[in-house]
Image: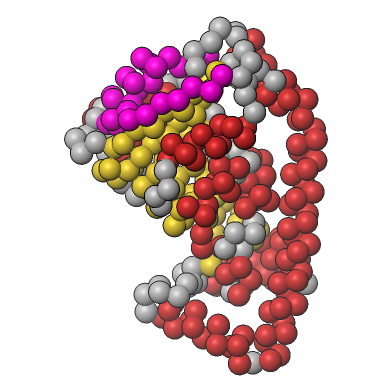
Amino acid sequence: MRLLASMELAVGELAQVLGQSQPRVSRHVKILCDAGLAERRREGGWVFLRSGVAEGAPGLKTALAALLAAGEANDPAFAIDCEADRRHLDAIRQSRQAHAEDYFAAHAEEWDSLRSLHIADGPVESALAAMLGDESLGQLLDIGTGTGRMAELFAARATRVVGLDKSPEMLRLARARLQDLPAGRFELVRGDFTDLPFDGAGFDTVLLHQVLHYAQAPELVLAEAARVTHEGGRLAVVDFAAHAREDLRERHAHARLGFSDAQMTKLFTDAGYALQAERALAGHELIVKIWIGVRRAEQGATSLRRTG
C-alpha cells in the first residue's frame, strides 16, 4: 500500500520490487481491490494498480492512510522495509526510461521528417503557456497525451492532470516521463477522444495538442471535450493551419490537412465554446495555430452530446 501511494505500478512491477512471485502478489492485490483499498486499470495487455487510499478519503480509508503513515514514522523495521522498496522503484523507473529511449530511437527519422516542416516545439509551448495566462489550470485533461509532454509542462499549474490516449505504447512513454510526479497529481487513462470515459463537466481546462488532425470527425471530438468541460472552463487546441501536404495522410496518418480559422470557429461554436484567442506560429511549410475558447453556459451541439 505504501508503494502504490508512491506511484502507479503494474502487477509484475510490484512483484519485482517486493521480490515475490507474481501469482502471490496478484492474490493479495485482489483482496485489496475487493476491499476498495487499491484500484485496477487495464491498459492493453497490462494491468496497472494505484492506491485507493488517501488522506482526506472518507471513513475507514482516512484512518488506514493515517495508520500506514504513522507506522512508517514510528516503527523502525517497517520504515527500513519501506525505504528499501522505494529504492527498488528506481529500477522500475530506469526500465521505463530505457524503453522510452528505445522507442524514440526507432521512430526518430519519421518524427524528424515531420518536425522539419514546422516551427520547433519550444516556441509553440511558450506561446501556449502565455495564452493560458498565469491562473491555475485546475483539473486539466490532456486529450491524446502521447508522450506526456504537455501534461509534464503544465502539471505545476494544475491541481491534477489526466492524460488520455488510445495507444498503450504512448501511455507507457507518458508514464516514463511523468513517473517522478506525486502519485495523486496525475492519472493516465486509455480511451478514445470521441467517447471520453469521464463524467460531464469535470475539467477546468481541456487540451488537444497536435491531435485533432487525426480525427475523422473533429466535431465529435470537440463535442466530447465540451461535455467534460464545466461552464467557464477552457479548451486549447494546437494544430496545423490548413495546408495542401497530401503526403501526410499516407506517411503520418493525418485525417485532416489542418484547419482554417473559419473551420475552427465553427467547430468551437457548435460544440458550445466561445472562441476567445488565436495565434499563428509560422515555421517552414506548415503553420502551427493555437486556438483557445471558453465553455458557454448554454449547451451547444445537443445532438452530439452523450446522454445517460
Residue 183: image location, x then y, percent: 56, 62
Establish if 81 lies above or below 10. Answer: below
Q: Is residue 44 visible?
A: no
User: Which quadrant of the structure image shows residue 259?
Assistant: top left
The one of 134 and 64 positioned closer to us in this rendering:
134
Establish if 212 lies above or below 146. Answer: above
Residue extent of the magenta highlight: 257-282
Look at the image and name its color scheme: secondary structure
User: Which quadrant of the structure image shows residue 107?
Assistant: top right
Is 259 part of what is drawn in magenta?
yes
Is 146 part of what is drawn in magenta?
no
Residue depicted at 74% across the width and 44% down the height: 100
The one of 91 and 261 positioned closer to us in this rendering:
261
Q: Is residue 283 visible?
A: yes
Residue depicted at 56% across the width and 36% down the height: 125
Residue depicted at 71% across the width and 61% down the height: 13
The one of 125 and 35 positioned closer to us in this rendering:
125
The one of 16 and 32 positioned closer to us in this rendering:
16
Q: How many marks?
A: 0
Residue 193: image location, x then y, percent: 46, 34
Residue depicted at 30% across the width and 31% down the height: 273
Establish if 286 lies above or below 26. Answer: above
Establish if 216 lies above or below 99. Answer: above
Residue 90: image location, x then y, percent: 75, 64
User: Which quadrant of the structure image shows residue 71?
Assistant: bottom right
Residue 70: image location, x then y, percent: 55, 87
For the C terminus, the image quarter is top left
